Amino acid sequence: MSVVTRFAPSPTGYLHIGGARTALYNWLFTRHHGGKFLLRIEDTDRARSTKEAVDAILAGLTWLELPWDGDAISQFSRVSRHAEAARRLLAEGKAYLCYCTPEELAEMRERAKREGRPMRYDGRWRDRNPKDAPAGVKPVIRLKAAQTGETVVNDLVQGEVKVANEQLDDMVLLRGDGTPTYMLAVVVDDRDMAITHVIRGQDHFTNTFRQVQLYRAFGWEPPAFAHIPLIHGPDGAKLSKRHGALGVEAYREMGFLPEAMRNYLLRLGWAHGDEEIIETEQAIKWFDLAQVGRSPARFDVAKLTNLNGHYMRIASDERLTQVVLPRIAALLQGNLAQGAEFRIKKGMAGLKERAKTLAELAESATIYARPRPIALNPKAKEVLTADARLKLKGSRERFQGLGTWTRTALEGEARAFADASSLKLAEIAQPLRAAVTGSTVSPGIFEVMEILGHEETLGRLADVLDS
């Protein structure tokens, strides 16, 4: 059997972390088995579905580098097919017309509330003659669900789960205005798309029993189901905005790399021994549903940040330079010094060792991109006392005559100057750092000076000394 999975988000908001992990699990499972990963936008709720949300979902999946096979499918474009399927069940006697008024349904809800039980339709039109229908009521089509026995789901993650059929009422398939319900649309679409495995969040489990009944009514074999545990916050409560839960695009803006996010989401509910760092190609080889746990996972931004730092350290200098340049340009309001890109790339090896996000990397990389005279932050200004400026002046004079402009030669000259002045190297290096970078924190100052070059370094020292 060729595996076919789908990711089916509702476009009512951003692609949240839980949805991103669901998409990842579907994608990995499909790639592991050499199948197809399809994308279906469940946009039948026209009042809440927006183009902006669709665009955000597509952009989020694209950033995560989870390509889907074929075109994205709009569920709304298939409403006529859904209605046709409901009318087929009606014609076969497996569904019926229900003429309940809104008032009758409200009374059922109130009675259930008074009796402390869930609201279930009481089946009053199940065997009633449509000739008794009240005037002016547009009927819905309801499934004639099994009333005895039980529905069993052999879930690939949760195991065998049963529910008594008496707990499931006759659900609406087609509303009075002719639009399909979610339950009907999902089953028909999954069947028509030849979905073999439905991998989704555990919060969908209650829907599964109803959907299995619907598959049986159509005479179709249900797909295999796998309900993955929910994601909780660090405190163990369901992940929410209170925990800072954001859309995928927000984590992109915060400076996380897609491969780090994939690795982190993979480990939120799935494990392969004690492995923590699992690159995508390895994940495809290893991933299967048997290793998905049943307990909720806890989302921890600190762990994601540390993992992102690892992926930044192993990323190529060229790639990081291209990714971070727009951020640097934004920080400097587009005012980049000539040769900034060349210097950033040359200094990237030292920069990326100290950053855990692209936002941090961009901030630190501005030392190679700022036009002269560079601004000094408050701490740098504190360092550049009158005494420190004298040391800078002496250092600059020695550097001017230096024939080889390398970090080794620069450090040697600074050390010789410190020795001659009965100073420690740090007493020379820290004023140099403040003057050359505008900060008290940077990669090794002699590395920075080498990358900036002879002219730029001496120019920055002169700017400070002349100010």
Image (cartoon, rainbow, N blue to C red):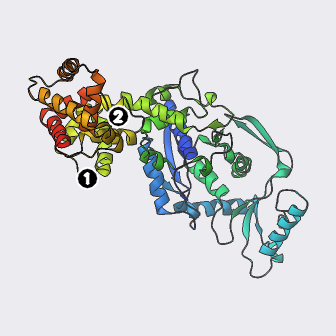
Crowd tier of the residue under label 2, counting other residues whose Cα lies within 10 Å: few below 14, some 14–19, many 20 or above: some
Tell me what residue is drawn at x 61 percent, y 33 percent: 269
Tell me what residue is drawn at x 82 percent, y 62 percent: 121
Among numbered discs 1 and 2, the one appearing first in the sequence: 1
Residue 79 coordinates in the image, percent (x, y) = 57, 63
Crowd tier of the residue under label 1, counting other residues whose Cα lies within 10 Å: few below 14, some 14–19, many 20 or above: few
Q: Hey, what amino acid is under mark 1?
A: Gly
In the drawing, does residue 235 fall left or right of residue 349? Answer: right
Asked whether the viewer can see residue 129, the reply is: no
Comparing labels 1 and 2, the label whose residue is closer to the camera? 2
Residue 137, picture quadrant: bottom right
User: How far is mark 1 from mark 2, CA to CA?
Assistant: 23 Å
Tell me if residue 99 comes above or below residue 45 in the rendering: below
* Residue that mark 2 sits on: 441
* Residue that mark 1 sits on: 334
Residue 395 coordinates in the image, percent (x, y) = 17, 28
Tell me if residue 355 comes above or below residue 248 in the rendering: above
Residue 106 coordinates in the image, percent (x, y) = 81, 70
Q: Is residue 195 or residue 460 the one in the foreground?
A: 460
